[in-house]
Image (cartoon, rainbow, N blue to C red):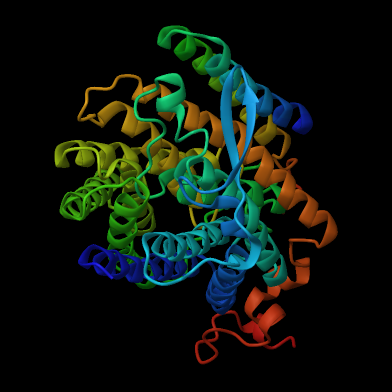
Amino acid sequence: MTPASVLCLFFIFLVPLAAAGLTLINAGLGRSRSAAHAMLAALCVMAVAAIAYTLCGFAWQGFAGGAAYSLHAAGREWNWLAAEPLFLRGRAVDGSTASLVLLLQMLSAGLAALIPLGSGADRWRLGACCASAAVLAGWTYPLFAHWVWGGGWLARLGVDYGAGQGFLDAGGASCIQAVGGLTALSIALILGPRRGKYAIDAQPAAIPGHDAVVVLFGCFLALPGWLGLNAAGAILCTGAEPGRAVLVAMNTTLSAAAAVLATAAVTTLRFGRPDASLCANGWIGGLVASSAACAFVTPAAAAAIGLVAGLLVTFTVAYIEWPLSIDDPGGAISVHAAGGLWGVLAVGIFARSPDNVSGQWLAQLVGAATLIGFVLPLTYSLNWLLHRLYAHRVAPEGERQGLDLYELGAGAYPEFVTHNEDFTQL
Amino acid sequence: MKALGFILLLSGWAIVLAAMALLRTGLDRGVFVTAGIGVEALGLALAVRAHRPPRGESE
């Protein structure tokens, strides 16, 4: 292995920290009676996603320059799906660049599959979480990731249609974050709100997270994970030189920093004091928004991207809860879908091409339109079909009791009985 | 209304694809891509609105 490959491998090894961070945030923002379920669901989802991606996901995603299915329309080729063999047959996993891409993508698919757990918290059955993760990692994620990172039609917008350098996304703001965030929106719509969230007059009730310390520790863990994700993605998926990892790390950190400070300032102005859970969402929103542009912008631009992401997350969390009446306990829709889409558009606004190629904004706009107009209906319809076959939502009794007792048979904190009636009715 | 929302989402995307494939200049493409995103926004609003829980049902 070359020194560059070893460096990439080190960055890839950091990616599970991002998953650990998101898991802690989702668990902490949920109810204490579903905390163990949230942690186990995350572990199972990562496991299912890794297997589903290895079985068939990589065959659909492939890599740039590999075998692919193409359509011909308007005199041009539209590369829409990879044609690699299933089960990684014939693929050497030997430290080559292709095998590093495979490893990064397997972990990225798991990260994308974790995101919907935030919006489905406290009411999503464990089996349904796993089934949804298999569909996401085995089909939805690889399909879009092929278009962006596998030499698909979005990546070729620059060559075929003169739109900048084609759709750019270094660290997965679109493929990982927006795809996961839009799936989170689908799950929240299909499941409906938690019992008691919206009262008779449709006003939302506050259901605060149960452990702010866990949530904020998750934010710390997520930072090295995102540094690894963005740096590995920039090098392996967009061809950046290894030395650019320093810029990527600086931009990622500055974006998160600006986002959390913006969120703290806004919540202080609105509520008189900073809100810990919203600040955590702002921090992750800044990381998410940094992912697309981290290798193509200056540190000042990265801070501006983070600043907007912090404001965006703060206001969309409130707007989604009311008046849209979507119950998203972990803020996954605001953080990952809205933050990811903003990150994608930010490339078109702030990225500077070394060759002064114009039209990058158009490529980014087409990518964002594809996420909203194609990925959202796709992921909604697949999860709706799954829901018809195997109901996603837990029974009302399970929701009242808490998913820990109902699905796992034991609470996360048995020595701290905070819901006495729940623990004594079994 | 839910189905109409998702049909509009897909229609907006179709407008975006058609703009890229059929139009020649960046400005024309930009205008039609923006229009396609507008149709998608309308579809998203309809789809979300169709999912809003009826008053009192969540109690």
- Residue drawn at x 57%, y 11% is B22
Q: Quadrant of the N terminus of chain A?
A: bottom left
Q: Residue furthest right?
A: A389
In this view, the residue in front, A330 or A102, is: A102
| Residue A225 on image: x %, y % | 33, 64
Q: Quadrant of the C terminus of chain A?
A: bottom right
Badge count = 0
In this rendering, would A154 be left or right of A96?
Answer: right
In this view, the residue in front, A337 or A277, is: A337
In this rendering, would A346 be left or right of B5?
Answer: left
Q: Is residue B58 visible?
A: no
Q: Is residue A315 visible?
A: yes
- Residue drawn at x 44%, y 66% is A103
Residue A202 against residue A188 in the figure, above or below: above
Residue A375 against residue A105 in the figure, above or below: above
- Residue drawn at x 73%, y 27% is B7
Residue A82 against residue A164 in the figure, above or below: below
| Residue B51 on image: x %, y % | 71, 40
| Residue A92 on image: x %, y % | 48, 69
In this view, the residue in front, B55 or A12, is: A12
User: Which corner quadrant of the image does residue A166 belong to?
Assistant: top left
In this rendering, would B49 be left or right of A181?
Answer: right
User: Which corner quadrant of the image does residue A159 belong to?
Assistant: top left
- Residue drawn at x 76%, y 33% is B2
| Residue A237 on image: x %, y % | 37, 49
Q: Residue furthest front?
A: A90
In this rendering, would A292 be left or right of B33?
Answer: left
Q: Residue furthest bottom?
A: A415
User: Which corner quadrant of the image does residue A21 belong to?
Assistant: bottom left
